[in-house]
Amino acid sequence: MLAAQSAGCGSSAARGTDAGGAIASIDARLRGSFRLVRFEPEVPLEPMLASMLEFQYAHLVVRFNGKRILADSPGLHVDRAYEIRDPAWDRFKLVSYDEAGVAYEALCEFSGQGELIVHAQTPPWKGLATLRRAQ
């Protein structure tokens, strides 16, 4: 759906330029820090993982710097490369890569309340997350 919305009329060179500008715009809005405020897994988590997730709500800060996602809390550190794809208004695909180069995809949307809604598409954390801009 996102790819269909971002595709338009005109030459492929014009679409490429438009996509580059749209990606730059999304990138500028995405840069900075967010806090995890909610995660609804597609499949219920086992009690130990659910407990770990509850702890993250008060502590996990996710930073986007244009090239890498840095997620930190006590006991957790994630540092991954990412790229923005298929921009369409407030929506885009975010693809991050772990140390082994495995891709993790998420469909993302900025909300009007300074939140980033993330539909994680890749196991083991498939589900809906809400990140709120950190102050």
Image: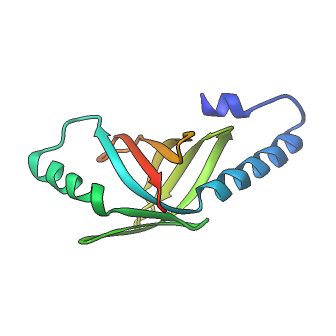
Q: Residue furthest toward the left?
A: 47
111, 122: nearer the viewer:
111
Expressed as whole percent of the image width and height from the top left, the position of residue 56 reads 27, 58
The residue sitting at 30% across, 38% down in the picture is 40
Q: Residue furthest toward the front?
A: 135
Quadrant of res 15: top right
Expressed as whole percent of the image width and height from the top left, the position of residue 116 reads 50, 46
Reply above or below: 124 against 134: above
31, 112: nearer the viewer:
112
How many circles with numbers are drawn on the protein?
Answer: 0
The residue sitting at 43% across, 50% down in the picture is 131
Reply above or below: 96 against 107: below
Quick check: 2 left or right of 108?
right
Quick check: 80 left or right of 57?
right
Query: How is the protein colored in the picture?
Result: rainbow
Quick check: 48 left or right of 40?
left
Screen quadrant of the N terminus: top right
107, 53: nearer the viewer:
53
The residue sitting at 76% across, 45% down in the picture is 19
Expressed as whole percent of the image width and height from the top left, the position of residue 107 reads 51, 40
Quadrant of res 127: top left
The residue sitting at 71% across, 34% down in the picture is 6
Expressed as whole percent of the image width and height from the top left, the position of residue 53 reads 23, 53
